[in-house]
Amino acid sequence: MTDVLHYADLAAALARLGVSDEASAYHGALCGALCRQAPEALDPLSLLEDGDPGDDAAGRATLSCLRDATARALADPEGRFAPLLPEDDVALDERARSLGAWCEGFLHGLAAHVHLELRDCSSEVREIVADFAQFTRAALDGAGDPEVEENAYAELVEYVRVGAQLIYLELHPRPPPAGRASQTVH
């Protein structure tokens, strides 16, 4: 996912559109909304919290391309999806804050456009949603071993990556492969 658009590129596109939203929060909202809607039914500008997108065609095109690439990544059976977060050379506390913002955005996007009844979802999806809600409050205490904190952050990112894709796959069941006849035996 990150080879399509980098965090800094999304942040720049949002800034050109006059939006102060954090890039990770926007990407999270996009992912959550894509779990509930087909990409062609989702206007990426509808996810903007503030700002006036005006006539910036390049910014609009960037968000549309990101929507399409994100939808393909979420649906990828090879698990190539990744949340769009700051690069590893950014301070860990800022990356952790961005991960929390991504999770908050995801939950917003998941719930904002189409009503979702969590009790109708699997226990796994309900657990992931509850975990994402906890991650929105994540913070570093700064007193821990930096290597341990980096490893913990990497594990959280991986959990979020897999969790978002699992939610997407549950809410977007795949049709059976073409040409496969019904397996019903009479």
Image (spheres, helix red, strand yellow):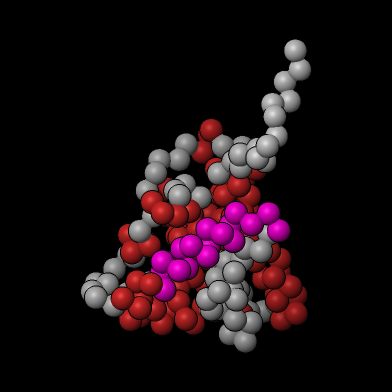
How many marks the image carries: the answer is 0
Q: Residue at x 65, y 40 (%)?
A: 178
Residue 114 shown in magenta: no
Relative placement, left or right, of 27 versus 154 is: left
Q: Residue at x 67, y 71 (%)?
A: 153
Relative placement, left or right, of 16 versus 163 is: left
Secondary structure mostly seen in magenta is helix
In the picture as drawn, the residue positioned furthest to the bottom comes out as 89
Residue 75 shown in magenta: yes
Residue 114 versus residue 157 in the image, above or below: above
For the question of whether residue 28 can be seen, the reply is no
Give percent across and percent down for residue 113: 37, 48
Between 105 and 94, the one lying in front of the other is 105
Q: Residue at x 71, y 58 (%)?
A: 78
Q: Quadrant of residue 181?
A: top right
Relative placement, left or right, of 142 versus 36 is: right
Q: Residue at x 41, y 66 (%)?
A: 64
Give percent across and percent down for residue 73: 59, 61
Quarter containing the C terminus:
top right
For the question of whether residue 117 can be seen, the reply is yes
Quarter containing the N terminus:
bottom right
Give percent across and percent down for residue 163: 63, 54
Residue 165 versus residue 68 in the image, above or below: above
Give percent across and percent down for residue 8: 49, 82
Relative placement, left or right, of 118 versus 115 is: right
Q: Which residues are magenta?
A: 62-78
In the picture as drawn, the residue positioned furthest to the front comes out as 179
